Amino acid sequence: MESRRINFRSQTALEGGARLSALALLLLLGGCELVSLGQREVEQPAAVPTITNETLLAYLDTMNGLASADPARQADVFYEVEREYTRAPTTTSTLRYAAALVTPGHPASKPADGKKLLETLMATPERMTPAERSLAAVLILETNARLKLEAENRRLLATLDDRGRSQANSDRRVQAQLEENARLRRALAETQQKLDAIKEIEKDLSERSSTPPGNRDTANSETQSSSTSR
């Protein structure tokens, strides 16, 4: 029953991750629209970065590729993202790599490491566009929830293991007690047999000692006479 609950929570975590990723994408798209509207009304300073369609597609392709059911595609996508980040750790490549790390469902997922990168990026928000900041914030919230759930799953598994060991120890104690009870029963039966034998000996000796000596001689003589007459 506990194992089903753990599997259900893990499945819920993945579903929640998918929903939050979708929400992140919506925020990302919304951020792009806000930047676009702001550019119509107020000219953006040159120092403020802007997000391009190419960058947006990179985020979307990364998430979509890592969500694929094809392990080969997952590996290819992650290798490309990791190589780009290693070669040039820009804000965009770092955010893309962090998103890859916190995305569940692929072998290279490392949510704790991805969270650290996201928090590093959020420490200098001026280097990101509003859409990128929204994406990073949502990914951090999602990762925190995932890490909390994984910690809870580990706790439940540890509890199950402890209960299993406790039950095994209890079973061994019960078995040992049963064997000890059986041994005591056998010893008691042997002792009872010895007591019964001793009682028979004592009874025989008591009967012999209760017969007077003369009677024993008479009885012996009569027995001998009877034997001679025959």
Image: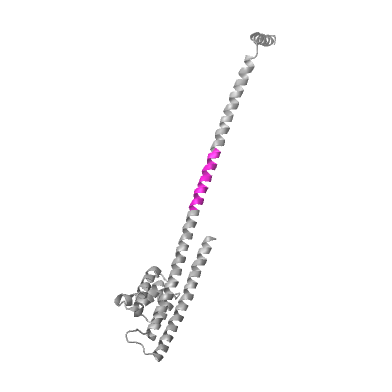
Asked whether residue 62 is in view, the answer is: no
In depth, the one of 177 and 37 nearer the eye is: 37
Q: Range of the magenta residues? A: 164-182
Residue 105 horizontal/vertical position (percent): 44, 71
Residue 195 horizontal/vertical position (percent): 58, 27
Please tell me in which quadrant of the rendered image residue 206 appears. top right
Q: Give the quadrant of the N terminus.
A: bottom right
Q: Residue furthest left?
A: 87
Residue 52 horizontal/vertical position (percent): 37, 86
Which residue is drawn at the image coordinates 55% and 39% (left, top)? 181
In depth, the one of 99 and 172 nearer the eye is: 99
Is 165 inside the magenta-drawn segment? yes
> Taking 145 as reference, is 79 left or right?
left
The coloring applied to the image is one colour
In depth, the one of 168 and 210 nearer the eye is: 168
Residue 33 horizontal/vertical position (percent): 43, 86
Asked whether residue 12 is in view, the answer is: yes
Q: Is residue 119 above or below residue 223?
A: below
Q: Residue furthest bottom?
A: 40
Q: How many marks?
A: 0
Is 6 inside the magenta-drawn segment? no
Q: Main secondary structure of the magenta part?
A: helix
Which residue is drawn at the image coordinates 43% and 86% (left, top)? 34
Which residue is drawn at the image coordinates 48% and 56% (left, top)? 161
Which residue is drawn at the image coordinates 50% and 64% (left, top)? 6
Please tell me in which quadrant of the rendered image residue 130 appears. bottom left
Please tell me in which quadrant of the rendered image residue 225 appears. top right
Q: Give the quadrant of the C terminus.
A: top right
Q: Is residue 129 above or below residue 17?
A: below
